[in-house]
Amino acid sequence: MKKYKNLLSVARKTSAVIASLALIAGGILPLILNASAEAGTISTRSIKLSSAAPSAAGVSYQLTFTPVTTTQELIVDFCSDTPLIGTTCAFAASTVPNVTGVTASVGTVATVGTGTPVHTIKVTGLTMTGGTPFTITFGGITNPSSATSFYARVLTYATGNSSGYVPANTTGGTTTTGTYVDDGGDALSTATTIQVTAAVMETLTFCTSGATLLNSTCTSATNPNVTIGGSLTPPALSTTAVETGTDYIQLSTNAQSGAIVYLKALYACSGLSSDGGSTCPIPGVGAFAPAPAAGTAFFGLNVSAATNNTTGGSGTVTANANYGTTSGDYGMGTNVTTTYGDPITSSSAPVAFANQTLTWAAQASNVTPPGIYYANESLVATGTF
């Protein structure tokens, strides 16, 4: 009985060996023969994309890896189903990149195969040193049209041997690897672009103030009313000297074409009146001019050049030359009585915290009727967005 058991055990072992040999002969051996006998697996491999947006054109793919062996030629084949070398390769315009027109940062680059899209890159004339990281950048690639994951099969070759690689020219077709040296796979993905939306409102801030707003904002503006005349006792306009009073304006806007500030006289006579604007014994000086001679009644405005707050803003505004940017020159044209007034200052671009001084000037004549004189002036700022 013991002898019989030993014979049965030997028979079972023999059957197992025969079955193993049959498995090798039927399945594993062809795979071994299709591989490169000296192949090593490249390490530290990655591919960076300059854009992951589906269908993005002109995208750069930067491939980095460390080869095992020193080699001279490279194949990069994009497939949608698997990174495994030598297996069938599925591809479509929606699932793999189109490498037609590809460029390379080093070596001589070409495309391989006739599939739609063309999905295989060959580079010759390289020096990839075993154990040393190697980087190559491909440009001019068009991403898959869908947000999808796909794979890059990377193979290195000795000089002349990359010509043995034949990619699948029909999706799901077989590839012929030829005699390669090292290999590896890499997974990539495109993704729907994230659109971040934020709104910026049109803004325009304009104010008048009785006190300077330099290094401040419109929130600190004071009553802009101005009293002209202080050289006489009691205070009154002189007939021999120009009397002045000042107030201030500040402008801020994000209007891309800037803003304009208009002066509108609420009295039709555009000067100083003691009867509510029916008459102006102290008339507007008219077009820009130096102050009139002594004994001439006039009313005018000088607008200074712009000064910016130190708290922000690099743009400037420019005073209208009709309002005398030179100290001592004044203007008060007839346009101030029109429907929309006369522009006195403007900017051609966005501006922040631009400050200007308004100097109101007047002089009485020897025959100016006595009385209290007023001028009501409206300033309107409009932006061009």
Image: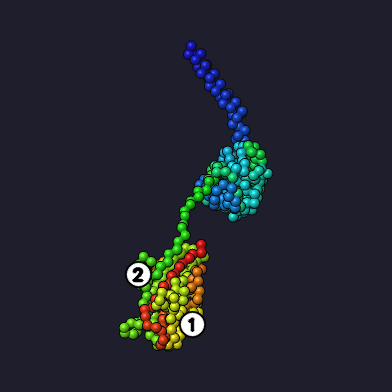
Q: Which residue is mark 2?
A: 222
- The answer to whether residue 64 is left or right of residue 88 is left
Q: Which residue is mark 1?
A: 289
Residue located 49% across and 64% down the image: 383
Q: Specify the color scheme.
A: rainbow
Q: Do the CB atoms of the residues marked 2 and 1 lie less than 8 Å apart? A: no
| Three-letter amino acid code of the residue under disc 1 | Ala
Mark 1 element type: strand
Residue located 64% across and 37% down the image: 173
Q: Residue furthest right?
A: 114
Q: Quadrant of residue 252?
A: bottom left
- How many numbered marks are there? 2
Q: Is residue 59 above or below residue 324?
A: above
Residue located 40% across and 67% down the image: 207
Q: Quadrant of residue 203?
A: bottom left
Q: Is residue 43 visible?
A: yes
Of residues 146 and 162, the one drawn nearer to the viewer in this rendering: 146
Q: Residue furthest top?
A: 1
Q: Position of residue 152 (x, y in %)?
A: 57, 44
- Give the class, few, some or many, for how many residues have Cα within 10 Å of label 2's Cα (few <14, many ≥20): some
Q: Position of residue 330 (x, y in %)?
A: 46, 80
| Three-letter amino acid code of the residue under disc 2 | Thr
Q: Is residue 364 above or below residue 103?
A: below
Mark 2 element type: loop
